[in-house]
Amino acid sequence: MAFDPGFGLGFGLGLDLDLDPEPAHVVGTGGAIGAVLRHWVYTQVANAGKDRAFPTATLTVNVVGSFVFAVAVFAGWGDSTIQFLGIGICGSFTTFSSFSVETVQLWETGNRRLAVAAAGGNLCLSLVAIGVAWALASVLF
């Protein structure tokens, strides 16, 4: 059975990904991709030498992942796409655990303003990204 994720590899191009339709395989494949993408983002942010005290990479992956997952959901893409892109790729790309640990570490080391900024930034910007995705999907799809 062919799998068309509908997000650029098959959507509008007539191409299909020939993935096993079993949810565990679809999620696992997406998860591997998301983990590598997350590592790449962390590496790029570290190499950019931006404010090392603030967890910029974690904020980036959480906001981008929230946006992408929300587009897939609000665009009404199918179950396999949600499993692959949303649960698999975005699930391993985003990180609640790193966000939580980094926020507590900032607090514990006396960087209370950065801790509050990290917590507020992750929550607020991720919700804004979801709102933008909803608006975009309602216009485009």
Image (cartoon, helix red, strand yellow):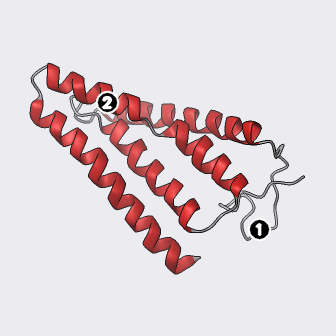
Select label 1 or label 2 by which is in front.
Answer: 2
Q: Which mark is residue 100?
A: 2
Identify the amino acid type marked 1.
Leu
- Is disc 2 placed on a helix, strand or loop? helix
Identify the amino acid type marked 2.
Ser
Horizontal relation, residue 80 to residue 74: left or right: right
Horizontal relation, residue 47 to residue 83: left or right: left
Q: Which mark is residue 13?
A: 1
Q: Residue 103: horizontal and vertical position, in percent? A: 24, 30
Q: Residues within 10 Å of mark 2 (few under 14, many from 20)?
A: some
In the rendered image of this protein, does residue 68 appear above or below residue 107? below
Direction bottom: furthest residue: 139
- Residue pictured at 40% horizontal, 44% vertical: 62
Q: Quadrant of residue 114 in the image?
A: top left
- Is disc 1 placed on a helix, strand or loop? loop
Q: Residues within 10 Å of mark 1 (few under 14, many from 20)?
A: few
- Residue pictured at 66% horizontal, 64% vertical: 77
Direction top: furthest residue: 109
